[in-house]
Image (cartoon, rainbow, N blue to C red):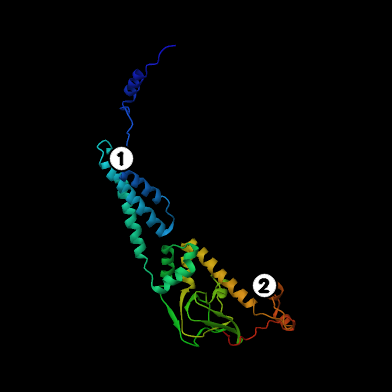
Amino acid sequence: MEHLDVEALNFTVEAVTGQPLCEEWRESAEGSVFHLANILLFLGFMGGSGFYGLLYLFTFLTLGFFCSTLWAWGDPCTTDSFLWSFALFGVCLGQLLHVSYRLRSVSLSEDFQELYNCMFKKLGVSLTHFGKIVTCCEGDIHTLERDQCFAVEGKTAIDKLSVLLSGRIRVTVNGEFLHYIYPFQFLDSPEWDSLRPSEEGVFQVTLRADNPCRYVAWRRKKLYLLFAKHRYIAKIFALVVRNDITDKLYSLNDKAFDNSGHRYDLRLPSYCHMPGTELEKADVFLQVPLQGPRTA
């Protein structure tokens, strides 16, 4: 069997490829800067979404590529590595400054920051989208004095969508108490959802402030224009409005009784679709008892 000349073979490969061969492996590991760079890059690629996720991502990538640049600078044989690391460092640094500027530009007042934390942040709404929502209402906060009406039954037009920020609102129909509206609940979600964009209507209930209240309101036309431009915001509002309606429905369901004292389920279609004349003759006429003073 013919003996294989490995040395001659290596020279042949070097001549063909034109690249120097690795004569021996380094016995020592790379410096600490090299390992730190890779650790930072690893942590950076674990970043999430949203403004804070991008801030986390580009912060670690910037630090990682900076360390990689320092490592490549110390080795004269790694010119290409140095140039690429420096270029990526510059790109990540630019992105970090851009995200920081956008995050700082979305400045919210204390009321809107609390509204965002309580209603929109848990749904994953970014500060950019919430900033558009705040701009739609022009950042105005409205107030109600004690016993002042937000809406009067059969008179007040349905022309806005409002969220209570502080205080408590009493909801009545024909003088009978229905339920309370508490902070970070919609004041007029059933009325909003009952009308199409081209329709008009008036409130069928009276909303009166139990104590000084503050609320934010969006005009219907401006809000529908925002929905037309941003379908994502339209889906978010549809979700929070209908969730609010569901909470109000279950709140009413706990207070509804028929004439025999049994609790009545408002979700039953027979009651919802019963004509007015038949409803007056029915034995299941809704009675909502007035609440007495609460005891500790």
Residue 92 in view in this figure: yes
Residue 81 bears which disc, if any?
1
> Which residue is disc 2 drawn over?
267
- Labels 2 and 1 touching (C-beta < 8 A): no
Few, some or many residues within 10 Å of mark 1 (<14, 14–19, 20+): some
Which sits in the foreground, 140 or 113?
A: 113
Which sits in the foreground, 87 or 293?
A: 293
Residue 196 in view in this figure: no
The residue that appears at 49% across and 72% down in the rendered structure is 220
Judge depth for marks 2 and 1 and give the one in front.
1
Q: In this view, does 99 lie above or below 196?
A: above
Q: Is residue 218 left or right of residue 293?
A: left
Q: Which amino acid does label 2 sit on?
A: Arg
The residue sitting at the front extreme is 27
Work out whether mark 2 precedes mark 1 in sequence or the reverse, and give the earlier one: 1
Residue 222 bears which disc, if any?
none
The residue sitting at the top extreme is 1
Which quadrant of the figure contains the C terminus? bottom right
Dot 2: what SS? loop
The residue that appears at 43% across and 63% down in the rendered structure is 129
Q: In this view, does 97 lie to the left or right of 274?
A: left
Q: What residue type is labelled 1?
A: Ser
Q: Could you say where residue 60 lies in the image, as x and y percent from the top left? A: 36, 52
Q: Could you say where residue 222 lies in the image, as x and y percent from the top left? A: 46, 70
Q: Could you say where residue 280 lies in the image, as x and y percent from the top left? A: 72, 83
Q: Is residue 50 above or below residue 269?
A: above
The residue that appears at 46% across and 75% down in the rendered structure is 217
